[in-house]
Image (spheres, helix red, strand yellow):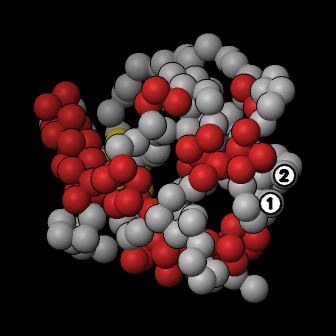
Amino acid sequence: KKLDAANNPVDLYSVELAKEFHRSLYPNEKFEILYPHSSYNIPLQRLGRFLNLARPSHLGLDLNADYGAWFAYRVAFLTSAEMPEIKKKDWVSPCDTCAKKPCVQVCPSGATKTMNFGLSDCANFRFSPDSPCLSRCLARLACPFKAEHAYTEEQINYHMMRSADLARLATFTR
């Protein structure tokens, strides 16, 4: 699919950065973007967990050891270049030891009650009239793990209100 800079500036920037990285280090090797904007369905959470980049959380999104809930997979690519193996230290989800679980306490939909995030509950509540969750996730904002890396208000609005993402989320409503 063609990238649309006006609608996806973060995606466009991320893809261009990945292309430049590959061009500068491996100019003669094959390169293909797998995510975003391809026909591939990449299991990013599974891949991130396998590589020790992230662990499950009550939020339905994974937590990163360095950035908590405030990170995202922006690009996945395939290359014919021989790349060095990087082994990240194993770690456990901080949800396992979080006693107060503020994400569970503040989530008005109840979607965060267990580690099996209730996507339909979240989507239904998020699209309900006057929902405080339409443009922000109260549970994510309440998570204390690496909270110093929280996105700015502008970033939160951008990521929560993208029309393509909202349309995809709407498919999970009952």
Give the side of residue 159 with respect to residue 19, left or right.
Answer: right
Q: Position of residue 101 (x, y in %)?
A: 78, 36
Q: Position of residue 59 (x, y in %)?
A: 68, 48
Q: Quickly name the residue at label 2.
A: 113
Secondary structure category for the residue under label 2: loop
Q: Position of residue 134 (x, y in %)?
A: 52, 69
Q: 78 or 159, which is in the foreground?
A: 159
Give the side of residue 40 with respect to residue 13, left or right.
Answer: right
Disc 2 residue type? Lys
Above-or-below relation of 65 to 21: above
Q: Are marks 2 and 1 in contact (CB under 8 Å)?
A: yes
Disc 1 residue type? Gly
Q: Quadrant of residue 107?
A: bottom right
Give the side of residue 36 with respect to residue 140, left or right.
Answer: left
Q: Quickly name the residue at label 1.
A: 110
* Position of the C terminus by quadrant: bottom right
Above-or-below relation of 18 to 165: above
Q: Quadrant of residue 143?
A: top right
Q: Position of residue 172 (x, y in %)?
A: 68, 78
Q: 115 or 77, which is in the foreground?
A: 115
Residue drawn at x 59%, y 72% as measured from the top left = 131
Residue drawn at x 26%, y 42% as measured from the top left = 18
